[in-house]
Amino acid sequence: MVDQARSRRLAKRISQIVAAALESEIKDPRLKMVTITDTRVTGDLQEATVFYTVIGDTVDEDPDTAGVAAALTSATGVLRTLVGAGTGVRRTPSLTFVADVVPTESRRMEELLARTRESDAEVARLAATASPAGEADPYRVPRERDDEE
């Protein structure tokens, strides 16, 4: 039987514990710019998927996602021990770390929207100075009958 409220509470608590551990307990320098964005726990409370993002030091710098993934994989045992001690559940869920794609996808969507706005402005500018390609009244007008017909 799945208790959704319990799994949500446990997921929130796991997020808090992992974030605090990355900030204070784990001393790996590759993990200094990692942010825990979400955690999802299965209904049987056996597996937890922790989503994270990596922020670069500067705006132009791409973060070292491969190094962060390796560092999180190597710290999984310590983090699972801390989660077990902090949650008090009978069986500590196994932790899986997944890079969160929401920030990159939202950035990509913003770029697409900006390009769309630019092309819409260009179309509106061209439409303002456009003239009809054919006659002024392109619709057929019914023929007027002559008196002779």
Image (cartoon, grey):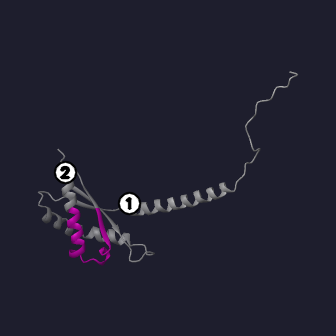
Give 46 or 143, whichever is nearer the viewer: 143
Q: Secondary structure at mark 2?
A: helix
Q: CA distance from mark 1 to mark 2?
A: 24 Å
- Farthest top residue in view: 149
| Quarter occupied by residue 16 | bottom left
Amino acid found under the numbered disc labelled 1: Val
Give 74 or 25, whichever is nearer the viewer: 25
> What residue appears at the point 23 percent right and 63 percent down from the top-left corner?
15
- Farthest right residue in view: 148
Give 138 or 74, whichever is nearer the viewer: 138
1 or 2: tag closer to the N-terminus: 2
Q: Where are the magenta residues, as a range?
A: 14-37
Say if residue 101 shows up in the picture: no
On-image quarter of the N terminus = top left
Residue 3 lies within the magenta run: no
**Residue denoted by label 1:** 102
**Residue denoted by label 2:** 5
Amino acid found under the numbered disc labelled 2: Ala
Q: Main secondary structure of the magenta part?
A: helix
- Seen in the image, is 145 located left or right of residue 41? right
